[in-house]
């Protein structure tokens, strides 16, 4: 009889890299499936040409929706004037905010129950909104974000955030915060990981391993 590997040795093995998650698929799962007839990531939602699993996104700003697009449509809508703000291309740059400063009290005031959050400026609400990934999807903090406005006011990089399509991604570590400026679709990729792998009260070893990998990928893109 062959000895079966114990749970411990399985847990020590490096988990396989997560399959690419189309953040639009995550969003649709969460909102109950808008336009279910189109499999996200298979065709451009602007011009219907076939597209691969890795493709850029355009935000439909008034509808709070991301659209999967081909590169030519993406470039066309990248010029904001082309659509008078209705559509906005999700940027592809990742930036590490090395001078980020936030106190524990300012973090607590956001009302985020996990050590991960993403915030962005929502044009139609004319304010920042804060979300965190949870097993149920992206969950919004409904608290007043006055403390976050203080953080933004003191940080020159955060003031230049692109509304609706670029997010501040925060990870709380033992005694510090990591802060990145990222395309909003990457936040939904993180939401997808948490939704798929979170177990029990604290999430479990697997989900935190995958979250570490996600952040390693974000760091890598900041250098590139
Ligand atoms: Zn297209
Ligand atoms: Zn997509």
Image (spheres, grey):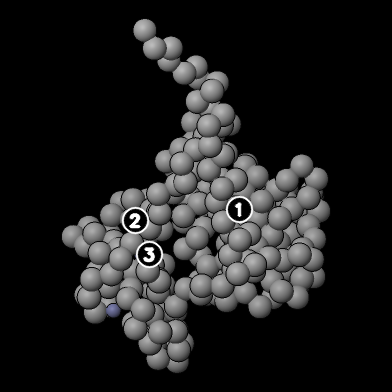
The quadrant in which residue 33 appears is bottom left
The quadrant in which residue 60 appears is bottom left
- Residue corresponding to mark 1: 216
- Residue corresponding to mark 2: 25
Mark before the other along the chain sequence, 3 or 2: 2
Distance of label 1 from label 3 (alpha carbons)? 19 Å
Mark before the other along the chain sequence, 2 or 1: 2
Up-down: is 146 above or below 1? below
Name the mark on residue 31.
none
Up-down: is 150 above or below 18? below
* Nearer the observer, 39 or 137: 39
Secondary structure under the numbered disc 2 in the rendered image: helix
Q: Residue at x 73, y 45 (%)?
A: 173
Distance of label 3 from label 2 (alpha carbons)? 13 Å
Secondary structure under the numbered disc 1 in the rendered image: helix
Mark before the other along the chain sequence, 1 or 3: 3
Secondary structure under the numbered disc 3 in the rendered image: loop
Left or right of residue 131, residue 20 in this image = left
* Nearer the observer, 195 or 2: 2
Q: Position of residue 45 (x, y in %)?
A: 27, 72
Camera sees residue 39: yes
Residues packed near mark 1 inside 10 Å, few (<14), some (14 to 19) or many (20 plus): few
Q: Position of residue 43 (x, y in %)?
A: 24, 69
Left or right of residue 166, residue 146 in this image = right
Q: Position of residue 47 (x, y in %)?
A: 24, 79
Distance of label 2 from label 1 (alpha carbons)? 23 Å
- Quadrant where the image shows the N terminus: top left
- Check contact, mark 1 vs mark 3: CB within 8 A: no
- Residue corresponding to mark 3: 54
Q: Residue at x 28, y 69 (%)?
A: 51
């Amino acid at each position: 009889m062959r000895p079966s590997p114990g749970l411990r040795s399985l847990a020590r093995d490096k988990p396989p890299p997560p399959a690419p998650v189309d953040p639009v698929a995550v969003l649709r799962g969460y909102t109950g499936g808008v336009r279910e007839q189109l499999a996200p990531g298979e065709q451009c939602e602007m011009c219907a040409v076939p597209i691969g699993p890795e493709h850029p996104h355009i935000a439909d700003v008034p509808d709070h929706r991301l659209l999967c697009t081909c590169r030519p449509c993406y470039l066309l809508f990248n010029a904001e004037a082309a659509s008078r703000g209705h559509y906005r291309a999700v940027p592809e740059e990742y930036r590490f905010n090395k001078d980020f400063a936030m106190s524990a009290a300012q973090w607590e005031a956001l009302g985020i129950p996990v050590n991960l959050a993403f915030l962005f400026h929502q044009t139609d609400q004319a304010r920042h909104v804060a979300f965190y990934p949870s097993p149920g999807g992206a969950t919004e903090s409904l608290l007043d974000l006055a403390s976050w406005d203080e953080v933004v006011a003191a940080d020159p990089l955060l003031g230049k955030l692109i509304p609706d399509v670029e997010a501040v991604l925060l990870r709380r570590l033992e005694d510090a915060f990591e802060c990145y400026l990222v395309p909003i679709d990457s936040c939904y990729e993180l939401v997808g990981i948490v939704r798929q792998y979170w177990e029990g009260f604290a999430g479990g070893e697997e989900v935190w391993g995958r979250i570490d990998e996600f952040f390693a990928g974000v760091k890598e893109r900041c250098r590139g």
